[in-house]
């Protein structure tokens, strides 16, 4: 019914990562610390590679909702509709509500998001909430209405 894969591809994020790397390496190199600049370059390359590999896979079908934030989850996390009290597609503030993007926890809440401020809010019967970010809220809304 609905499938979406999202990745960290925001230009501002990559500008910060690359800009910080270049400035740090140049500052160390100009100071004669060549080994340190190579270490920083290697660490930032690993960080950039990790960020580039992270992806959020969301799948909604007739039986369940499936979430996978690779590489944190090797296999998908699934929720059956029997566990869910309410579903809604809505705007939210990742910074205010969860402290940012990625895999986030707050008491009674969990968020899976990589960018933006729209998502699927799942209220579970046990009182806990899960928010899954989306870049396709209109399409997701149509699917939620059918459930």
Image (spheres, helix red, strand yellow):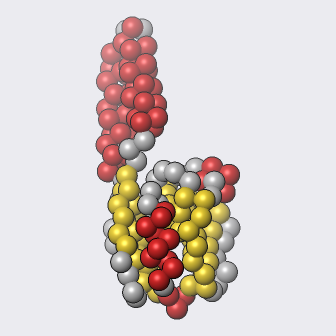
Query: x, y (%) of residue 25?
Result: 38, 19
Q: Quadrant of residue 23?
A: top left
Residue at the image position 39 percent from the left and 60 percent from the top:
56
Residue at the image position 31 percent from the left and 43 percent from the top:
49
Residue at the image position 42 percent from the left and 84 percent from the top:
64
State whether residue 127 is above or below residue 95: below
Query: Could you say which is closer to the camera, residue 42 or residue 82?
Result: 82
Query: Could you say which is closer to the camera, residue 3 or residue 13?
Result: 3
State whether residue 121 is above or below residue 125: above
In the rendered structure, the answer to whether residue 75 lies left or right of residue 97 reads left
Query: x, y (%) of residue 57?
Result: 37, 65
Query: Could you say which is closer to the camera, residue 83 or residue 23?
Result: 83
State whether residue 28 is above or below residue 47: above
Residue at the image position 35 percent from the left and 39 percent from the top:
48
Outermost residue toward the bottom in this view: 82
State whether residue 86 is above or below residue 116: below
In the rendered structure, the answer to whether residue 144 lies left or right of residue 9 reads right
How many labels were placed on the picture?
A: 0
Report the quarter where the N terminus lies. bottom left
Q: Is residue 97 visible?
A: yes
In the rendered structure, the answer to whether residue 139 lies left or right of residue 118 reads left
Query: x, y (%) of residue 114?
Result: 46, 53
Q: Quadrant of residue 11?
A: top left
Q: Quadrant of residue 22?
A: top left
Query: Could you say which is closer to the camera, residue 118 or residue 26?
Result: 118
């Amino acid at each position: 019914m609905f499938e979406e894969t999202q990745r960290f591809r925001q230009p501002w994020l990559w500008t910060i990562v690359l800009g910080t790397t270049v400035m740090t390496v140049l500052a160390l190199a100009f100071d004669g610390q060549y080994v340190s600049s190579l270490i920083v370059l290697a660490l930032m390359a690993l960080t950039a590679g990790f960020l580039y590999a992270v992806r959020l896979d969301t799948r909604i079908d007739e039986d369940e909702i499936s979430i996978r934030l690779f590489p944190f989850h090797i296999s998908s996390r699934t929720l059956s509709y029997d566990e869910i009290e309410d579903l809604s597609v809505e705007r939210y503030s990742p910074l205010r509500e969860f402290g940012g993007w990625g895999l986030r926890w707050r008491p009674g809440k969990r968020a899976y998001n990589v960018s933006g401020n729209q998502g699927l809010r799942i209220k579970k019967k046990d009182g806990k909430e899960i928010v899954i970010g989306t870049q396709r809220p209109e399409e997701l809304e149509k699917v939620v209405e059918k459930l």
